[in-house]
Amino acid sequence: MILEVNDVSKVYKSVNRSLTVLDEVNFVVEKGETVAIVGASGSGKTTLLGLCAGLDVSSFGNINLAGHNLNNKTENEKASIRNKHIGFIFQNFQLLPTLTALENVMLPLELQDRAKEAGPKAKELLERVGLGDRMDHYPNQLSGGEQQRVSLARAFSNTPEILFADEPTGNLDDETSVVVEKLLFDLNKEHNTTLVIVTHDMELAQKTSRIIRLKGGKIISDEKVNA
């Protein structure tokens, strides 16, 4: 087991009302699983991803990630857990604009004081995603698909146990999406990483081994696919 979500709720309170975005959500993800979390806009899927990754705090319930109970950790402790165990892929890439593609991919390893292996590992991953000739380019010199391939390389650079992907093809055209999806699943298999994807794209979701559907902040189904 790599991720356990127990009775997790997220409630936003204002002066005269409260909004329940997630309502007593429960599920477990085993090591090596590929899971899609799907649902309409406003169903709570991106909020849930943020909670699972320790980027936000649940109002009720507990989340256990890679053997750590996130609810009793400080922000610095959660940042350390993320750096050691988690990879991220975002819809809007979130590359640092002042760093080259190579430097962006090296960064997670440098943050782990693994600077000696950072360069060779980053070059190997950029070659793997087909960007061996673009290593010295800055994000604004790359297309959207190329930027997402850099973010893929960065996500796998610290050999994460679990990878969280938030609408990884949401900003890409159909042709580029196919390339990025194949790289994502191929790299995930090669590194034996657990993969959790938030998406509204059912074609992408069907490529995982399990689909969790959210509606109104509740899980309405949790089904194995491609069995």
Image (cartoon, rainbow, N blue to C red):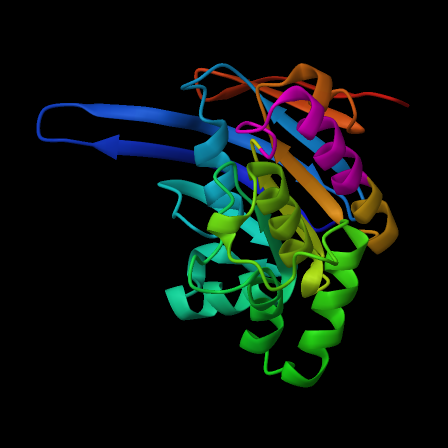
Residue 138 location in percent, x, y? 51, 57
Q: Nearer the viewer, residue 221 or 200?
A: 200
Residue 2 location in percent, x, y? 70, 51
Q: Is residue 171 visible?
A: yes
Give the number of marks.
0
Q: Residue furthest right?
A: 227
Residue at 42% over, 33% down: 9
Residue 44 location in percent, x, y? 44, 26
Which corner quadrant of the image does residue 184 belong to? top right
Q: Magenta stretch: residue 180 in it?
A: yes
Q: Nearer the viewer, residue 225 or 4?
A: 225
Q: Nearer the viewer, residue 174 or 225?
A: 174
Q: Residue furthest left?
A: 15
Residue at 47% over, 29% down: 24
Q: Is residue 4 visible?
A: no
User: What are the residue bounds of the magenta stretch?
Assistant: 168-185
Residue 24 in the image: above or below residue 185? above
The quadrant in which the C terminus is found is top right
Residue at 46% over, 69% down: 77
Residue 111 in the image: above or below residue 92? below
Direction from residue 15 to residue 36 in the image, left or right: right
Q: Nearer the viewer, residue 137 or 43?
A: 137
Report the magenta stretch's main SS: helix
Residue 88 location in percent, x, y? 58, 50
Residue at 60% over, 50% down: 151
Q: Magenta stretch: residue 26 in it?
A: no
